[in-house]
Image (cartoon, rainbow, N blue to C red):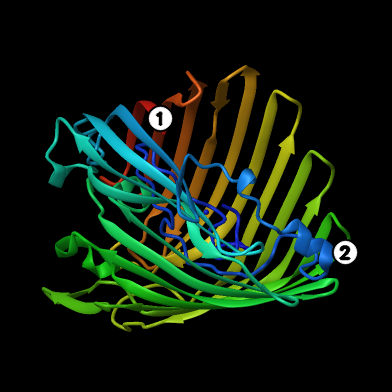
Amino acid sequence: MNHGHEIITEKKVIYLRRCFWSPVVLSCFFAFSVPQIFGQENSWQSLAGEASAMSRKVSPDKIDYNLEVGPVLLKLNAGLVNGYSSNIGLTSSGGAGSAYSTPSLTCNLSWPITDLNTLTFGIQAGYSYYWQASQSASPGGFFLQPTSVLKGDFYVSNFKITPSDAFSLQQNPTQATELSGVSKLSLFQNNLGLLVTWDAGDFLITGGASVFTVKALNSSTNNYLDRNALSPSFSVQYNVSKTLAAGINGSAQFNRYQNPAQLIQTNGIYSVQGQNNSDLFQVGPFVNHQLSEYITVGFDLGYLWGTFDKFPEVNQGGYPSTFYLDFNWSHALNQHLKYSITAGRIEQPSVSNGITFFTQWTFGLSPSWNVIDNLSLSTPLSALIGEQSGSNGQKIQNYTGSVNLGYQIMEKLSSTMGFTYLIKDSNQPNQSYSQWNATLGFTYDF
C-alpha cells in the first residue's frame, strides 16, 4: 500500500499514487485497489510565512488554457484512437479479436478563486466502438476517465484544507487481473475526500477521510461488486532536511457491500456467492528522499491486518495479517533517458465472485526515451504475482510489456502509436489467456 495517495495508482494524497492504464485507453482511475487516503504531504516547503504565501500565488499566465469562460480557464482537446485488440473475451482459447475506434474529448479546468486558492479538475469522456463485436460482448461503450482530481487547496494560517472528488466509468475488464473469460466490466467509481494538513514547523501532520463507492452498471452479472468504503487516515511527517522526509502513516477501511455474501448449498456442497463485508487496517513508516538533482526514492513498509464476515461451512482463508510494501525509484540518467522502478505488496478486496481478498506483488520498470526532437518513446514493463484467499483461490502471474511512441506533428496536432502484449498465467483451468493491442491515435488542441 502507499502513503500519499488516493487512488488512484499520480503519486498521492487522496489522489492515487498509481493508476492502472488500459491498453485500449479506457482506464480505471481507481482500478480495483483498496482506496487509500494516507494524508502524507510529499513537500518539504512550509505552509506558513510570507515567502510561502508568495510562492503559492496563482498567476493565470502560468496556466495552460485555450478557452476563457469568465474566471474559469479551460484546456480543451479532441482525440481519436483507432486500434485492434485480440482476444477481447479474455478466453484461454485465444478468442476473437476486433478493430475499434475511440473518439474522445478532454477538458482540463482551472479556476483561480483567489490569489492563493485554485480549483482544478480534468476529465476525458469518450466512446469506444468495436467493429467486429456487439457492444454487449466487447469492452466498448461510453467511458469517463479523470485526468486530474477535482480539488481545491484552501489555506488558513498554518493549515491547508483540501476537499476533493474523482469519478470514473470504465468498461474494460483487463483492469481486473483476477478475471478471465469476461468481455465487459462496466463500473462507475467515485472517491470523495477531505484532507487537512497542519504545518507544525518541521512536522506536517495530516488527517482525512474518504468515501469510495463502486457501482456495477451491468448489474445482472457484477452487482456483487457494489460497495461503499469509508477510509479515515492520518500521517505524521518529519522534515529532516529540504530533501529528506520521514514519518509514519496509517489508515482504516470499512467495506460494506450492497449485496453481502450468501452461503449457497447445491447437492450438499456449500459455496459462497458475493463478497464479504470487511474491515482493514494498516500502519507503518515511510521515507522520501531526493538523493540528488536527478534521483528520488520513496519507501513504505508496514503492517496490515483485518477481519471479515466468515461462513464456517467453507474455507475462505484466514483473517488478513501481513505486511505491505511500496518502493519507488526515479532517475533522470541523462538528457536522453529517464526511468522509474517500482515494487509493491498489497492485500485488497477481491473482484472475483465468492473470493474475499487478493494479495499481490507488483513490479514495474518504466523507461522514457528522448532521442529525437518532438518524438517521445516509452517502453514500460510490469509484472504481477498474486494469490486469492480461500481454498478455491487462484494463483496468478501477469506480465505486460508496451512500446509507446508520441510525435508532435504540428503546434496543435500530435499523434501516438502503441503496442501492448499481456499474458496471464493461472493455476486453474481455463483462466489463463494472452492479449495484444495495437493503437494509432491523434489529439488536437483547440
Residue 427 in the image: state x and y as whole percent: 37, 49
Q: 437 or 13: which is nearer to us?
A: 13
Residue 420 in the image: state x and y as whole percent: 41, 30
Q: Nearer the viewer, mark 2 or mark 1?
A: 1
Asked which quadrant contains residue 218, the reply is bottom left
Q: Which of the labelled discs sits on residue 240, or is there none?
A: 2
Residue 187 in the image: state x and y as whole percent: 29, 58
Do we see residue 78 in this rendering? yes
The amino acid type, in three-letter code, at marker 1 is Tyr
Residue 135 shown left or right of residue 282 in the figure: left
Crowd around label 2: few <14 · some 14–19 · many ≥20 (10 Å): some
The amino acid type, in three-letter code, at marker 2 is Val
Residue 3 shown left or right of residue 398 in the figure: right
- For the N terminus, the image quarter is bottom right
Residue located farthest toward the top when viewing the structure as drawn: 372
Q: Which of the labelled discs sits on residue 444, or is there none?
A: 1
**What residue sits 79% from the left and 65% below the top?**
246
**What residue sits 41% from the left and 59% below the top?**
32
CA distance for labels 2 and 1:
45 Å
Residue located farthest toward the right when viewing the structure as drawn: 241
Do we see residue 428 in this rendering? no
Q: Which of the labelled discs sits on residue 418, or is there none?
A: none
